[in-house]
Image (spheres, helix red, strand yellow):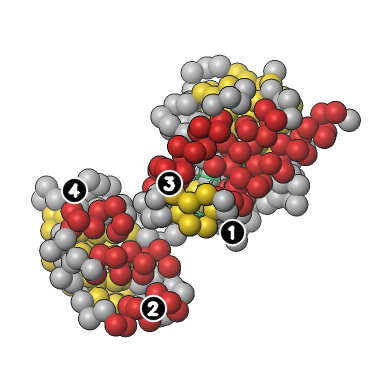
Amino acid sequence: MHDVIIIGAGPAGLSTAFWCDELGLDALVLEQAEEVGGQLHRVYNPINNYLGLKAHDGAELLVHFTADLEDAEFDLWTQTSISSVDLKARRISLASGEELQSIAIVIATGVRPRELGVPGEKEFVGKGMIESGARDRDRFAGHDVCVVGGGDAAVENALLLAEVCPTVTLVHRGRKLRARREFTEQLQAKHCITVFTESVLTRIIGSDRVEAVEIQRKQGLKPFQLAVRGVLIRIGVEPNTELFREQIETDERGYLVVNSQQETNVPMIFAIGDVSNPISPTISSASGAGATAAKVIASRLTK
Ligand SMILES: Cc1cc2nc3c(=O)[nH]c(=O)nc-3n(C[C@H](O)[C@H](O)[C@H](O)COP(=O)(O)OP(=O)(O)OC[C@H]3O[C@@H](n4cnc5c(N)ncnc54)[C@H](O)[C@@H]3O)c2cc1C
């Protein structure tokens, strides 16, 4: 029996573990990936908005986080697959067959990039699918590419790629781009970027790597093919809540609903970080929520 089991070792989960140690709580962190850090592994841009610390990218910030955790006492199990969770009983069953029990559970499972769900998307990972404009720019320099999405992340990536690619085609389902004005103004000045609104990418085509995409402009029109070497998809994220959804309150998009103390509607089940915070998915919010959850749990256990 642990005081707290934390599911997920991104910034939110790590912050809770850190605070559990500060407060003398016995904590176990379960992480499905090989390494801790969550989305920090996908941040290739400089992080300039985490008060008190600047980092060239997520990997550098993670070095600081793990250094601070070196002396903290908590158990961490990576590469751990959870097969089911009984939230009311606060019992977790692992794929290995092991059963775990705790007084409180903190859900810190974060979000994952939303998939487009078109043919070719999975097949061409590592063969022309671009993960990040900042990271992969040099690899695609001199080649035509396509970016899907209309928010900040899509437009920012299109702008980055336009610095080195002869043409960038931005495909967006809606009538208007959702990106902030700072980005859309820069877009207008970049003549190598073509924007197709009210359009969808329907297929990624190639033999052993990406060679073209199929785009459907407006309903009813015939799709056409466009030769490209790279495709980057940035159509938002979705919360990792499938394990819990039937047992807990979520919003219409599947995010966990919490009060100001990070409590869900199930007693002693807390949710922190991006999985419960679609409004402000940031490292500072995630680590702050981790501190709140640990403090609230500690106060409950001493009552
Ligand atoms: C490209 C990019 C740039 C960004 N730039 C910034 C920035 O400049 N500033 C900023 O503040 N934020 C930035 N962010 C956002 C920031 O990374 C997130 O807000 C933060 O990582 C959220 O932390 P989290 O712990 O809630 O979730 P995550 O980081 O998503 O971590 C969740 C963890 O839970 C694990 N997990 C999921 N399901 C399970 C399961 N069933 N069992 C066990 N483990 C599980 C995952 O493997 C992961 O390790 C950026 C994000 C991206 C993608």
* N-terminal label among 1 and 2: 2
Residue at screen point 21% across, 77% down: 192
Q: Kindly state the secondary structure of the residue where label 2 is placed.
A: helix
* N-terminal label among 2 and 3: 3
Q: Kindly state the secondary structure of the residue where label 3 is placed.
A: helix
Give the distance between the C-alpha atoms of the residues marked 2 and 3, in whole angstroms.
26 Å
Give the distance between the C-alpha atoms of the residues marked 3 and 1, in whole angstroms.
18 Å
Which label number is shown at residue 280? 1
Quarter of the rendering containing residue 205: bottom left
Query: What residue is shown with label 4?
Result: 127
Disc 3 crowd rating (10 Å Cα; few below 14, some 14-19, many 20+) is some
Most foreground residue, 72 or 12: 72
Q: Kindly state the secondary structure of the residue where label 1 is placed.
A: loop
* N-terminal label among 3 and 1: 3
Q: Is residue 181 above or below residue 82?
A: below
Which three-letter amino acid code belongs to the residue tagged 2? Answer: Thr
Give the distance between the C-alpha atoms of the residues marked 3 and 4, in whole angstroms.
24 Å
